[in-house]
Image (spheres, grey):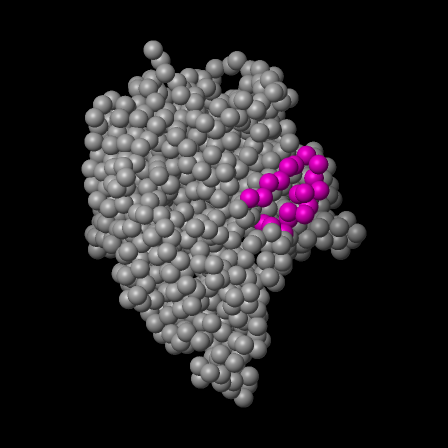
Amino acid sequence: MSLRAYVLRRISYSIPTIFLVIIFNFVLIHAAPGDPVIYLYGHLDVTGQQIEIIREAMGLRKPLYEQFFIYLSRILRGDLGYSFYFRQPVAELFAQKLPATLLLMCASLLPSIVIGIVLGVTASRHARSRIDYLISGSAMYGYSFPVFWGGMVAIVVFSVWLGWLPAMGMTTLTVAEEKVGLDYVVDVLRHLVLPATVLGTWYLASYVRFTRASMLEVLEKDYIVTARSKGLEDRQIYYGHALKNALLPVLTVIGLEIGMIFTGAVITETVFAWPGMGSLLNAGIVSRDYTLLMGGFLITSMCVISANLVTDCVYAILDPRISYR
Amino acid sequence: MLLIVLSSTTALALAQTTVKKTYGGTVVCTQGGDPATLNPVLNTDQIYLVQPYFDYLVECDYEGKIQPSLATKYEISSDGLTYTFTLAQGVKFHDGKELTSEDVKFTYEKILDPKMGSGHRSQVDAISQIEMPSKYVVVFRTSRPVPWLLDSMVDIGILPKHIYEKEDFLNTKYNYQVIGSGPFKLEQWLRLDRIVGVANKDYWRGRPYIDKLIFKVIPETAVALSAVESADADIISSQGTIGGFPMAHLERLQKNPSLSIELFPTLYLQKLYFTCDVPPFNNIKVRQAVAHAIDRKYIIDALLNKVAPKANAPWCAALSWALSPKWTDETYYRYDPEMAEKFLDEAGYKKAPDGIRFRTTIYATTGFRTEMSEVIRSMLARIGIEAKVESSDWTTYWTMIRFNHDKVNGMYTVYSRFSDPHMASQYYHSSEVGGGGTNGMRYKNQRLDDLIGKGKTTAEASQRAAIYKEIHDLINTELPSFSLYELPGVTVVNKRISGVKSIKGAVCGTYVPSLWRDAWIPGEAVTTTVTPAKEPSADLTPMILVAVGGAIFGAVAVGVLLRMRKPHRSG
């Protein structure tokens, strides 16, 4: 079967998957106690009777199945609906938040993929030597520290004590005039350093560990012995023969991370007040913003599905033994 | 002739100023959560975020006293049923249209419409008629005297009728792209990121000194503090800090030479409520025992850095006219574990062989109030009450208290703001039990209901005071709720900004109005830039950075992949 036919078939499979995801999300979100009206009015001296009037106005008193079909028909028309809390179209909110999240995720994911794989190979090359212990030891540490805590420590050290880098946000706000052009880009990059490093360290550590483990397994294979006996250079053995085969499990992990590209940084974004999708979804959960959450989950699941698809295709490019069936 | 009347506070402030203030600069305030909307009819929670963009019929001076504002003059008839406001002339909305009595009437009608779900409605629902004898005069008629009406009006910004009347009021873009007549114009609101206001150069009372006012949303309080300490932001205050200001950090902040700290009384009160309709708390002795077992001084010292005053009433001490003199720190359930044990024995909750009298639950929202509940739990353990703390998120918590009565039995912690004892009393009315009402204590008392009803319809000051003193006595004796302490207000400001001052007590106890009344930035050069209003839109720079980075990475990745594939083909 050709690649194109394979991709088309996979896409047709994903339609029922997405439908199931919508149903599942709807049920799950409505199962949580409370609703947006309680979040907004519960603590105020608004009477119970008035709360019911507001619910009526927001369409929350209709039976659940009716609410579901109203939502579904809107989704099919490509309308993600109106946020209960933000009182703004959901699509507009996501469009506003997307760039910042993409920037943060790319700045932390991409370098950590490259550096992580190189370090992982280096560690496996010197397995059980000092270099290996140093690399896998720090990777273990980097993988286990909570991003939340790491972020706080980074802020205290680099912003409050040393004053080198800004503590939060994406741009400097205290200046009289907004920065433009190159100044602006430099400003954004300065704000990017801490969150991207903290988040990137975590990704980096996980790639180092995966690559190293996978490499060690592959290095025991017969064809590596053959390659060595052929007298190939180390570099060629490690990067040419071993890594190519060792990369497949790593690729799976990368695929999963990229699938989570919109939601993977929720905690980091919260710690650094980074204006991305994370804070939006977080606020949606707290305020039981049904439309916002379902929109977010829908987009995320579509990302995961397409990232899986891409991963599968890259698999086949990397490993000719895999054919599309 | 264009008549501009200055409010007395602004006039006073100008008279006292000897320094020549300069214009310009940006002030960045930290803010814990993004508001749902900046529409003053719909936002009753973060009024200080709405204030910069609107005008109000009346306002509070720094002492918390009501002063004329948009209404340069107001009169209340002797029977307390007619309020006449004379509006300033020549007040323009940010789109250039003049503000008239039509707009005032429109705004209040929206609040009174129950379908709009305005949180202000319960405070002004006695307004029965709104008349407009002229373009600049509005007359409110009420069905009964409403002594707190002016207090409520401090919170209600006037909307432009010509913009909102054509819109679906609940779901219009003007709820987040608001147009008002206030000292700042909303330039840009990036949700969960920042709200940017620019000085309204044509403001009828003179433009603010600062050019730009930014509320930066920082969800983590610890990060917001760091931002102020590293001068990435200028102001953090108890207003807008989720879960309350972290008082434990005050000492460190006080040592920071670039920050100035202001503490002031507010109208916020922390209480402990009991569910009064089921055992064990249906027994008054048990409630009183719990009150005697709680060491309020310890809570204030350990958790609040010793700055909070004890509360001995169901409302704040600032409402002193409504306080019964009977109650002091000594007479209001002073810390006495022995007395508590005696009361519990009398109530029939004797100690079992394992030392436990009964088991119960303390419900709290996550964060500070959970911490406090843990402290209370350990205090109750000493007298043989084994309590568990159940911590839940905001929405779950309020659903439980208002709707799932059958599931809640024990105590719960709430802090609320009461600008009038009437509002505080209403929480104890039997009509608010069940159906999602506010009386989560399920406390019913006919005598109290009668008094609350009387308090609501009485206008004469001394009679009102007498009624609320009686309510104070009744609630303190019956104890459906135990008041713990008054929440002090805190404002921490970077010293580069001068003239930031908080409004004491008052309706919302905030520093925000000082940002256009008096605040200025001495070091800032005079700027004359006029920033054109922007539509809130996505910022494209990150996208471009992503695209460039992604392209480089993609090229490298493709190169690597192709190279790797080669040996296979040949081999």
Q: Check if residue B249 falls in the magenta segment.
A: yes
Q: From the image, which quarter does the C terminus of chain B lie in?
A: top right
Q: Give the tally of numbered discs.
A: 0
- Residue drawn at 75 percent across, 50 percent down: A134
Q: Nearer the viewer, residue B502 or A139?
A: B502
Q: Percent x, y for residue B275? A: 39, 68
Q: Is residue A67 above or below residue B484?
A: above
Give left or right: position of B489 versus B74: right
Q: Residue at x 51, y 14 (%)?
A: B529
Percent x, y of residue B446? 28, 66
Which of B414/B327 is in front?
B327
Residue B273 image position (x, y, % from top left): 43, 64
Q: Residue at x 38, y 74 (%)?
A: B282
In the image, residue B46 sits, relative to residue B88, either above or below, namely below
In the rendered structure, the answer to whether residue A314 lies left or right of residue B115 reads: right
Q: Is residue B554 visible?
A: no
Q: State the residue in front, B461 or B444.
A: B461
Report the magenta residues as a range.
B246-264
